[in-house]
Image (cartoon, rainbow, N blue to C red):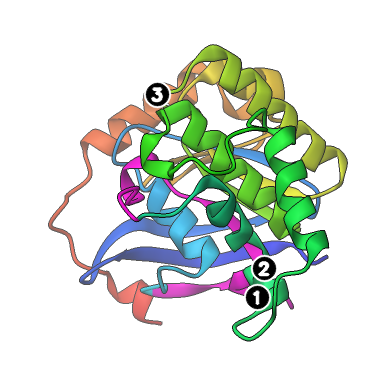
Amino acid sequence: MNPITLHNLTLGYERHPAVHHLSGIFKPGSMTAVIGPNGSGKSTLLKGITGILRPLGGRIDRGRLRSNQIAYLPQQLEIDRSFPITVLDFVILGLWPEIGIFGGMKCDHWKKAEQALQTVGLDGFETRPISDLSGGQFRRVMFARMILQESLVVVLDEPFTSIDMQTTIDLFAVIQRWHAENRMIIAVLHDFEQVRAYFPQTLLIARQLVGWGETGQVLTDENLQLSRRMSAAWDESAEICQEDMA
């Protein structure tokens, strides 16, 4: 597996940058927390890494890794749960890259989906509509779908927001298992205690890079104060600069 390398990366919307001149490397098997003040470009960065958002400037080198080989968990607010689909059918979508448009479901596929639901503590929920689930239950379903994807890269955007403590503990166990399997984990988090306890690497951004490296060296009071000052000083109306056009 190759690293994911950011080369002078600028990301944004309608030529207004949200992440500005970011360079660095996510190494194979690394487990990195992405932190920063609200509105500092964290979710935008994840969308760039997954290929949802194209760079305004610079580039992202994923090696031979394709966008559909990255398991991505968006924020809860970005998911429409009104679609009439059961828990089991939703989880099965994690096998889409393997099955394809014309591939048929086999008994082994259904067993994998049921095992994934058992892993996240939702055995017995197979026939429930996803619209009937609590926030924590739906997060478990999303993790079950990612288990089926078996991707080498897992990207998580605020995976533990608005869920109960037991769900958080159970899903952290899944993440730790992925890390033990040498997968690359990139997660946006707000709880610094979780970052210190579980994530060896931290990327701190405030539209621009503040720090990237070992968590103990990045997650300092000085860096956090600097990130807040940088975020407060950012001009939301600024357009992409000429350096991005190079």
Q: Is residue 205 above or below residue 67?
A: above
Which-is-in-front pick, marks 3 and 1?
3
Q: Is residue 199 above or below residue 12?
A: above
The residue tagged 3 is: 162
Q: Is residue 65 visible?
A: no
User: Which amino acid type is marked by label 2?
Assistant: Gln
Q: CA distance from mark 3 to mark 1?
A: 31 Å
Q: Does dot 2 land on a helix, a strand or a loop?
A: helix
Image coords of residue 215 (percent x, y): 66, 28
Along the viewing direction, whichever of 67 and 82 lies nearer the viewer: 82
Q: Which stretch appears magenta?
A: 57-83
Image coords of residue 169 (percent x, y): 65, 18
Q: Does dot 1 land on a helix, a strand or a loop?
A: loop
Image coords of residue 145 (percent x, y): 62, 51
Q: Which mark is residue 66?
A: 1
The residue tagged 2 is: 69
Residue 31, image quadrant: top right
Q: Left or right: where does residue 206 sit relative to residue 8?
A: left
Q: CA distance from mark 3 to mark 2?
A: 28 Å
**CB-based contact (under 8 Å), mark 3 and mark 2:** no
Q: Earlier in the sequence, mark 3 or mark 1?
A: 1
Q: Is residue 145 above or below residue 21?
A: above
